[in-house]
Every structure is written in structure tokens, then in C-alpha cells.
Image (cartoon, rainbow, N blue to C red):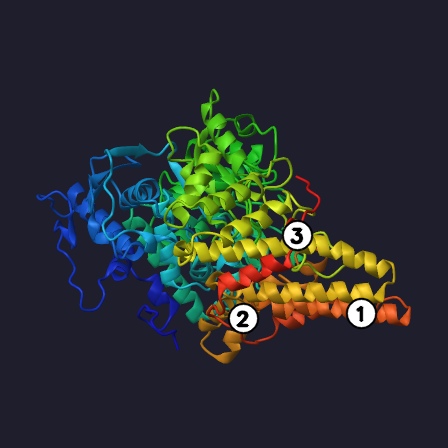
């Protein structure tokens, strides 16, 4: 049975979905709610205050499209600001300059003008930030602090984007942020991205459906393909040609419902004038493709972190041209057309065999343009990609490189490296969904300004690329602001302004807290890392543990006492400002980080006690560790953004029966723990790659591991023997196979719990710093 409230497309078989014309699907997705009356073409859209459009517009004319833009922006605005939306007049002007908004108005009557729905929402976001002093962050907001009547705009303000491309979402975001999210959750994400000036958004959910439909024409049964396609939690890496099958098999109904969801998201983006960036086809095929399709040439791709990679179909072969056409046809039927497609051939390795990469790249682009003439190919700048051979084979005027390393390393010259190909400056400041605070924000500011100003600059955009979204709201706000601020951003002034609007009005203690965070975790430098260190509470137990994820920093990247002082300041914020979700989230997150940083002080003491064979001291310190884990689990359990139960409940909600629900829960649990196979976890070093301090995850997995480990060490001290070995993968795999339930709603008083952590921690818990 489908989940309650989820709309299903008609027809008992997948072919019914594939056969739907794009225009009909768009109408279905845009249909009004039951009982609602849809406005006629050219009619004004009302919501308290009329949104202005051309009175003489006819269907198909620019004014009619302006009606759609105003209506879409109005719907988003009513979701974002339900109490104040009626005080905005949205003027969708098809003749306005692209990527530009104008804000003006008197108290209680604010007017925003722009060409698209997204431009209108960006104008609303600018007004909230610079005039109303409120924040709608990701996550947390202070809109409850807005006055009943919104303040006037002192003088009309017009802003234009500094770069044409404002791209968002890493290929891994669906896997690490929430592969089982609802339409409403995805739509909220789109609303936030539009509010912050983004105009190009990667749509991954449902991408597997095009493969599922197209490959049935090339010798594969539906059942075979459902075994080949991974569970949603691991599909990001299947689309990157890194793995297949894990977390499945997936069901036909899951494929259909995810495809419908993705189609609705693409249409939602179009309605706002944003570009849905869809996965393109570059040659991934199941096993035995060449055997089933005479004349086809495939190249085995070898190993990726313990997984056998899917084969690569030579793009220069006739079989590729046919399969690509079938893929794009199946994709168009559900997702419609787009102007931008994401493809990264040979991502993180891969083997070229006898394939000419230059010719292959040209063939990939030709197949794309045959289906979508002139479409832009977006390729990730990561490790050695894109290679010179790939760039030499394509029309680079139709290519955009999303640079994932802009703020990580020094001495970067992107024009020389990529021969002047247009690129977007990007940041991956979060890996695997880690809950750690911090980002190289000063590096962003310096490089965006300098790289735009250099002679012959090819900088054409920004790319918001954390591996998981929904953490570090300050980083999200600042990074997206880069594209809209007319002058260089002053980091100190920006954080002071953020502190004021984050909780609804200026407060000295809030300002002091964010100044500490600015100087500490948000001022880390480039050179080796773009992310801060993770927590030792989440690490696989070892007395010499230096980090949880193998690929993360192994020591503090900033003075720990900056976070500790920030916590004290946040606890002294005016009680009148403590009611917002923004304050609650920041308080819980800062308390969590202060405690996580303390784990790096406490573990060396435990090690010293063990090596000194001081049993009493060892027991005292390990008891402190366990108490820290209990405090950590409690404080993060008081905020809805840190709950394992919510993550698991959503995964189970997509299953049609108990066995399917269990499969998807394993998919969701394994990505957080073992990640994949034993070889992936151990030899590929991916265990705990997606570690995060979540209520339920801390108490059940992380604390359980440390309790077992410390127990083995205590036993060794008592017996005077070497500690017994523990098969950690077996322990973690058993946890991933569980179906234990955890709270999906927060409980406890965040302020009291955070204050308890502050009282238990030293005033300035310092740890060695290394950038």
C-alpha cells in the first residue's frame, strides 16, 4: 500500500508512467488542491495583496508567464512566512533584467520586483536579512520575532547577481541528507534555496527510473534491474558509477513513486524559474551488456572502495548512441526537459581501457545535445577531473565545472588548470553529514573576490556542494550571499549581522557568541582541509583514535575554547530571544560541539591511565566518558534536527510490506555505520564515514561500542593480560541489521540540558590545533 498522503500515478505497470507526456505530467504536478480554484491564464493571483501582472496578458505571452512566476513565488512565500506573506506585493516582470530584484515599500506594504519566482523570493530574502532583521535558515528561523507590521524599506534597493550560475547540491546530498524524504521536505529545500539566490538545483531523486525503463529495451528484465539498482541511500554512488545493488533489491512501486517525486520537484523548480539539473547519461551499464547487445563494447571499471564498479559502455559505439537516446526519452517522459545535466565520467578512478577519452567525451556531449540541443554539461571538479583529454573533446562553451576544491588547497589557478573553461567556485565543507561546526569562510570571501577580479577570469558561478545539507546554517547563508553582495564581504561585520537577525534582534551576548564562532571554527584556513574535525565519541574505539572518519582531519582545526566561550554567551542571551527554532538549534549544536571537542581532551587522559595501569583512575575517567555520552545524547534529543528515529522512520515509510521496510531501514542504517560491504568498511575505510552525533545513534551504536571497548580494557587491567580483540565490523553490521525504534520527536529542555553541559565542562577545554 502507498504511504498515506502520497499521490500515485495511474496505471498498474511502470510503462504507464513512462508513457505520460511531459506536458500532461506537468499539469498533474501543478494541479490545484481539491476544492481549490485555479486562476485563468493572465488572471491576477491574490493572497491578501494582489501580485502585479500585465492586465492584457494572453496565454503563452510573457505576461502570462509572469502570472505563473508570481503565483509560484506567492505559494512559496506563504509557506515561508505564513503570518506576513500578505504584506508583500510580488511583481513578476518578464521585461526585467535576469537575476535581478528590486525591493521597496512602506511599513506593512513591501513590494518586490523580478523576472522569475526565484528572483522574487531572493528579494524577499534580502529584505528579511537587511531590513526586517530576521533569518530563515537551514535549519532554524527567527520569523516568530517579526513585528505584526513589517518595517518600511528606507529607499528602493536593486541587486543583481554577480555570477550567472548559482548551483546547489552535491551528488551525495540525497544519500547523506535524506534519501527517504517527502515531497514537502524537498519543496522546503527548494524554497530555501530560492530565498538565498540559488538558480540551479540538482535533482537526483527518481533518477534511476530512466535507467530502469531504457535498459528493458536492451535485454534486461525488470526484476534484474531492480536487483542492480541500489537502495535509495546508496543510489548517489551508483549514479557516479561506483557501485550497484547494495541496499536492495528495490521494488517497482518504490521506483515509480521516487520517479513521480523527482518529476514534481523538477516542475516545482521550473515554476520558480530555476533550472532542475538532471543526471545525464555517460555510459553506465549492468553486467553482460556486451553479451546481450552484439557489437557493444564495454570496459570493466574495477574496484571502488571494495565494490565492483558497473561497466562503462564505450560512448563512441553505436550502442551508446541508442541507449543514450532511450535514456533521455524515458527521462523526459517523467522529468521533462532541462538546460543543464550532471555527468562525471570516470569519477574517482575508473578505467579507460582502449577507449579514447577525447572521442568519448565528444560522443557523450553529442548524445546530450541530440536529446537537448545546447544543454549545459555540469561536471564536478574533483581530484584529477575533469581531465585535459575530456575537455579537449567537447564544446567547452557548453560546459560548466563545479569546483569542489576551491577552498581546500592553496596555489590554485583554475584558468590555467582548465584552459579557461567556465567554472563555479565551490565548497564541500561537510563530508558524510558530519555534525561538526565550521568552514573556511574567510577563504571563500578572499578567493571569490580575487578570482572574479583577475585578468581573463573564467569564474562564472558559485557551487554550494556540502556532501550533506541541513547543518551549519551560517555557512549556507554566507556562501550564497557571495553571489549577491555588490562589494567584498567583511567577515566580521557579516557575522555580527548574522547574530542580530538569527535571533530576531541585536543582543550583546549573541554577538559575542558568534564572534567566538567566527574566530574559531568559521575561520579555518585552506591548505589541506575544507571541513572541521569530527568527534571522538563517534569514532571506532581506540586509545589512539584521532577522528571518526578515516578521511577527516585528525586534530582540532581551531582553538576549542572558542566554542566553549560561545556556549557560555549563548546561555546568557536575553530570555525573550530564546523561543525561536534558530536559537534552540544553535544552542544545542554549540553545546554538542563543545562536548565533542572535550572528547579530544578526555581520551588522552584515559590512555595515560590505562598505560600506567591505574585502574581506579581508568574507571573514573571512563565513567566521565560515559556520562559525556549520556549528556550528549540527551541534548541532541531535544532538537528535531538530531534524531535517528526520524531518519529510520522515513526509510521504513517507503516500504510496502515488513520485508521491504526492513530492507530500507538497513539501507538507511548501513550508510551511517558500515557504509557497505565488509571490504568497503575495512579495506575501503568507509566505516563511520557518515558519522554524526544524533540522538539514538550516540546511545545505541557509539556508546555501545565504547562501553564494550572500555570493558575489555578494564578486564585486561584486572587480569594483567592483553585485551581481547573485538570484530568491530561484525558489531556494526549487527547494529545495521537491527530494527529497534527510536524517538522521532524531540524531548527535554534544550536550555537546561545545554546549561548542564556547560556546568560539567572546564571553562576553556583546549586541544592541539592543526590546520
* Residue 644: image tag: none
Name the quadrant of the C terminus: top right
SS at mark 3 in the image = loop
Spot the residue most to the left.
56
| Residue that label 1 marks | 712
**Do the numbered discs 2 and 1 sit on residues whose CB atoms are within 8 Å?**
no
Name the quadrant of the N terminus: bottom left
Sequence-first disc among 2 and 1: 2
Q: Nearer the viewer, mark 2 or mark 3?
A: 2
Residue 273: horizontal and vertical position, in percent? 29, 45
Viewer-proximal residue among 492 and 744 = 492
Sequence-first disc among 2 and 3: 3
| Residue that label 2 marks | 665
Viewer-proximal residue among 476 and 514 = 514
Q: Estimate how packed mark 3 is, as few (under 14), some (14 to 19) or many (20 or more) residues with alpha carbons within 10 Å.
A: some
Residue 63: horizontal and vertical position, in percent? 16, 43
Q: Nearer the viewer, mark 2 or mark 1?
A: 1
Spot the residue most to the right.
720
SS at mark 2 in the image = helix
> Marks 2/3: CA distance?
29 Å
| Residue that label 3 marks | 302
Viewer-proximal residue among 104 and 370 = 104
> Marks 2/1: CA distance?
30 Å
Amino acid at each position: 500500500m502507498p504511504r498515506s498522503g502520497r499521490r500515485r500515478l495511474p496505471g498498474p505497470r511502470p510503462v504507464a508512467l513512462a508513457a505520460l507526456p511531459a506536458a500532461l505530467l506537468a499539469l498533474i504536478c501543478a494541479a490545484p488542491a481539491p476544492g481549490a480554484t485555479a486562476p485563468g491564464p493572465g488572471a491576477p493571483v491574490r493572497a491578501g495583496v494582489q501580485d502585479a501582472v500585465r492586465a492584457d496578458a494572453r496565454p503563452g505571452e510573457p505576461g502570462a508567464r509572469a502570472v505563473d512566476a508570481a503565483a509560484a513565488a506567492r505559494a512559496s512565500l506563504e509557506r515561508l512566512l505564513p503570518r506576513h506573506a500578505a504584506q508583500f506585493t510580488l511583481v513578476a516582470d518578464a521585461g526585467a533584467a535576469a537575476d535581478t530584484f528590486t525591493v521597496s515599500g512602506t511599513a506593512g506594504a513591501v513590494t518586490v520586483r523580478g523576472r522569475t519566482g526565484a528572483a522574487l523570493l531572493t528579494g524577499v530574502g534580502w529584505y528579511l536579512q537587511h531590513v526586517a532583521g530576521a533569518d530563515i535558515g537551514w535549519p532554524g528561523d527567527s520569523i516568530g520575532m517579526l513585528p505584526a507590521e513589517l518595517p518600511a524599506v528606507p529607499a528602493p534597493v536593486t541587486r543583481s547577481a554577480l555570477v550567472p550560475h548559482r548551483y546547489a547540491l552535491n551528488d551525495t546530498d540525497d544519500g547523506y541528507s535524506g534519501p527517504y524524504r517527502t515531497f514537502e521536505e524537498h519543496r522546503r529545500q527548494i524554497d530555501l534555496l530560492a530565498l538565498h539566490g540559488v538558480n540551479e538545483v540538482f535533482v537526483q531523486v527518481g533518477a534511476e527510473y530512466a535507467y530502469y525503463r531504457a535498459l528493458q529495451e536492451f535485454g534486461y528484465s525488470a526484476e534484474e534491474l531492480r536487483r542492480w539498482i541500489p537502495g535509495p541511500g546508496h543510489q548517489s554512488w551508483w549514479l557516479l558509477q561506483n557501485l550497484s545493488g547494495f541496499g536492495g533489491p528495490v521494488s517497482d512501486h518504490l521506483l515509480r513513486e521516487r520517479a513521480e517525486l523527482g518529476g514534481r520537484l523538477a516542475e516545482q523548480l521550473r515554476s520558480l524559474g530555476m533550472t532542475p539539473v538532471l543526471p545525464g547519461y555517460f555510459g553506465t551499464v549492468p553486467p553482460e551488456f556486451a553479451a546481450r547487445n552484439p557489437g557493444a563494447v564495454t570496459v570493466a571499471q574495477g574496484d571502488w572502495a571494495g565494490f565492483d564498479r558497473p561497466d562503462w559502455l564505450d560512448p563512441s559505439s553505436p550502442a551508446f548512441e541508442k541507449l543514450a537516446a532511450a535514456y533521455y526519452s524515458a527521462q523526459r517522459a517523467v522529468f521533462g526537459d532541462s538546460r543543464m545535466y550532471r555527468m562525471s565520467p570516470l569519477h574517482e578512478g575508473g578505467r579507460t581501457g582502449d577507449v579514447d577519452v577525447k572521442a568519448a567525451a565528444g560522443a557523450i556531449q553529442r548524445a546530450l545535445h541530440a536529446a537537448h540541443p545546447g544543454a549545459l554539461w555540469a561536471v564536478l571538479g574533483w581530484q584529477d577531473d575533469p581531465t585535459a583529454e575530456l575537455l579537449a573533446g567537447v564544446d567547452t562553451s557548453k560546459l560548466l565545472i563545479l569546483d569542489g576544491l576551491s577552498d581546500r588547497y592553496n596555489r590554485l589557478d583554475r584558468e590555467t588548470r582548465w584552459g579557461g573553461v567556465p567554472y563555479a567556485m565551490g565548497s564541500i565543507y561537510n563530508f558524510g553529514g558530519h555534525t561538526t561546526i565550521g568552514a573556511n569562510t574567510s577563504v571563500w570571501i578572499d578567493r571569490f573576490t580575487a578570482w572574479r577580479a583577475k585578468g581573463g577570469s573564467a569564474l562564472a558561478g558559485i557551487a554550494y556542494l556540502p556532501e550533506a545539507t541541513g547543518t551549519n546554517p551560517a555557512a549556507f547563508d554566507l556562501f550564497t550571499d557571495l553571489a549577491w553582495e555588490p562589494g567584498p564581504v567583511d567577515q566580521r561585520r557579516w557575522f555580527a549581522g548574522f547574530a542580530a537577525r538569527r535571533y530576531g534582534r541585536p543582543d550583546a551576548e549573541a554577538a559575542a557568541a558568534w564572534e567566538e564562532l567566527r574566530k574559531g571554527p568559521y575561520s579555518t584556513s585552506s591548505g589541506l582541509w575544507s571541513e572541521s574535525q569530527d568527534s571522538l565519541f563517534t569514532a571506532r574505539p581506540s586509545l589512539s583514535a584521532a577522528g571518526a572518519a578515516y578521511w577527516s582531519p585528525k586534530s582540532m582545526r581551531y582553538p576549542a575554547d572558542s566554542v566553549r566561550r560561545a556556549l557560555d554567551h549563548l546561555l546568557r542571551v536575553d530570555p525573550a530571544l530564546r523561543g525561536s527554532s534558530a536559537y534552540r538549534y544553535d544552542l544545542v549544536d554549540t553545546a554538542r560541539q563543545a562536548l565533542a571537542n572535550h572528547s579530544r581532551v578526555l581520551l588522552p587522559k584515559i590512555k595515560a591511565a590505562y598505560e600506567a595501569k591505574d585502574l581506579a583512575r581508568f574507571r573514573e575517567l571512563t565513567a566521565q566518558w560515559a556520562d559525556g555520552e549520556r549528556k550528549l545524547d540527551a541534548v541532541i534529543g531535544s532538537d528535531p534536527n538530531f534524531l535517528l528515529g526520524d531518519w529510520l522512520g522515513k526509510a521504513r515509510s517507503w516500504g510496502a510490506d515488513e520485508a521491504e521496510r526492513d530492507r530500507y531501514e538497513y539501507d538507511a542504517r548501513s550508510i551511517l555505520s558500515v557504509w557497505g560491504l565488509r571490504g568497503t568498511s575495512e579495506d575501503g575505510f568507509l566505516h563511520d564515514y557518515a558519522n554524526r552525533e544524533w540522538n539514538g545513534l550516540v546511545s545505541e551504536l557509539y556508546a555501545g561500542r565504547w562501553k564494550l571497548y572500555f570493558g575489555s580494557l578494564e578486564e585486561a587491567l584486572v587480569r594483567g593480560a592483553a585485551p581481547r580483540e573485538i570484530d568491530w565490523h561484525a558489531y556494526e553490521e549487527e547494529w545495521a541489521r537491527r530494527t529497534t525504534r527510536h524517538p522521532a520527536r524531540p524531548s527535554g529542555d534544550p536550555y537546561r540540558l545545554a546549561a548542564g553541559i556547560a556546568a560539567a565542562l572546564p571553562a576553556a577545554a583546549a586541544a592541539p590545533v592543526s590546520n
